[in-house]
Image (cartoon, rainbow, N blue to C red):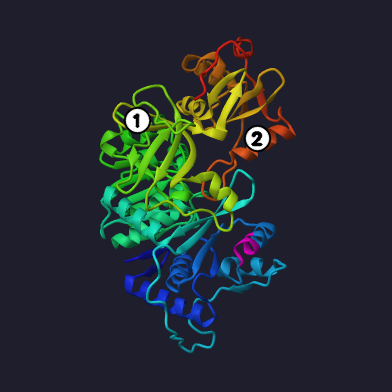
Amino acid sequence: MALIHGQKQFTYAMLRESVESCAASLVARGGVAGERIAILSENSPFWVISYLAVIRAGCIAVPFECGLGPGSFNELVRTAGMRLVLVSPRFEKKVRAWQTDRPVEVCSELEPGGDGVAITPSLPADMRESDPAVIVFTSGSTGRPKGVMVTHRNIEANTRDIIEYMGLTAEDRVMVVLPFHYCYGASLLHSVLMAGGTLVLNNDFKLFPEAVLQDMERTHCTGFAGVPSTYQILLRRSRFKTMKLPSLRWLQQAGGKLPNACIQEIRESFPQVRFYTMYGQTEATARLSYLPPERLTDKLGSIGKGLPSTRLQVVHPDGRLVKPGSDETGELIAQGPNISSGYWNDPVETAKFFKDGWLHTGDIARVDEDGFIYIMDRQRDFIKSGGNRVSAKEVEEVISEIQQVVEVAVVGGEHELLGEAIHAFIVPAPGSGLGPEAIMAYCSKRLPAFKMPEIIHLVTALPHNHSGKVMKEELKQSLCQDPSSHAVAASHASRTEDRQPGKRVSPEH
């Protein structure tokens, strides 16, 4: 079985026939090699068939987020130069109502012909491995969408590596709650189908995480993948830790740093399950590194080492390698067949991040004496407070150790004296009674004064994008609008004076 979606099931033979038929239809509609064709759909057989058919027809698939508004939709259509968008019936009416200054055809039918007549035009027999297969749009530092060009070679190389290190087989049955338009979700699609396994699709996780667990049990899923918020929701808002899930063989996590305390809770609850901590970027197709489950105890917090086909280095601004086993930090850069060739029609941004054959990730890291890599934070997420350079990730890690915390995000906000103040947005467990005083008391035991939050914001939820990642820019914007809204000033006696410029300075590398 290839796909299970509710009561619908697709065998590999059914999926292959549907993909060939849809690809033939696209060619009959005038689809030519290299043409960009968008896909806007929830996770469903429609999405899978559309995606594979676009690539099979020799065109380039351009996945769109389901939450796009008309402005963003039209901007992406113009940027990628598209004339055709494949839209699932659920979104068809909404998309047809959107006006655009570039004519675009909206198609929700995957049948070979509108009148039931079979269409069998010739399909491309071969495509060059260097040809783009997918363009994945991601927000950039400029605020404009950037289209990452992912080639056929990128997908094949990254997928084979993932299958190899995870040991995926045709016996694997994987619960998918991550959207396929997200590179992490797409990597599940690629790897499970290449291994001959089964994808179980469920779009109800945000509202009904408990129901997803029951679906996993009912369908005998062997694997599950999530971003940090996925696991934090499971730990704090479901019976995840007490469920048996006898068929479960592995869990994988990427898309940001899951707090060590959460990883330890999961391991204690599922000692027989292999837990893979992974790291990647859209510009790397999906995956750059992984930490073997057997090293989770002695290398907790590490992203591991590069994939079999990927070379990773941590370098100073002048290109020198950081010294392993030292406190030196530098930028993580990557090289390999999984690395994108750059951004669609954007030579300026391409030149910023793709230099001399290396992808510059923008992540600051260190390397231990055994060559394992630890991400300290994103360059843009470091907070400069009172002359100190503070990792938001480090503060989040400490606050996440509090059992009553569902989720936390730390950002910097403008401060007249400190330059930037440390703001912690915290979602407490419902009914826990967790207050700012208890949070500050715990932080004071684990953090030096200059890393203590200045303001605690107790909120009911954090803003997430459709991939489940916390939207920190939105939190920063909320501070600009009203920095005191729903906030509680930290009562730590020495918080400001101990962080004034010149008091304690964390070295910048």
Helix, strand or loop under label 1: loop
> As displayed, is residue 4 above or below residue 20?
above
The disc, 1 or 2, on the residue closer to the chain's N-terminal end is 1
Locate residue 267, reporting x and y percent.
32, 35
The answer to whether the residue labelled 1 contacts the one labelled 2, judged by CB atoms less than 8 Å apart, is no
Locate residue 45, reporting x and y percent.
45, 67
Locate residue 405, reporting x and y percent.
50, 30
Residue 494 lies in quadrant: top right
Q: Mark 2 points at which residue?
A: 476
- For the point 40% across and 54% down, which residue is it? 187
Q: Distance between the residues labelled 1 and 2?
A: 30 Å
The mark tally for this picture is: 2
Residue 389 lies in quadrant: top right
Does residue 5 appear left or right of residue 30 in this picture? left
Q: Mark 1 points at which residue?
A: 300
Which of 345/177 is in front? 345
In the rendered image, the quadrant that contains the N terminus is bottom left
Kind of residue indicated by mark 2: Lys
Does residue 269 appear left or right of residue 43 in this picture? left
Q: Which numbered circle lies on residue 202?
A: none
- Magenta residue span: 76-81
> As displayed, is residue 150 above or below residue 307?
below
- For the point 46% across and 86% down, which residue is it? 119
Locate residue 508, reporting x and y percent.
52, 23
Q: What main secondary structure does the magenta stretch of the protein show?
A: helix
Report if residue 85 is visible in the image. yes
Judge the density around disc 2: few (<14), some (14-19), many (≥20) Cα neighbours within 10 Å.
some
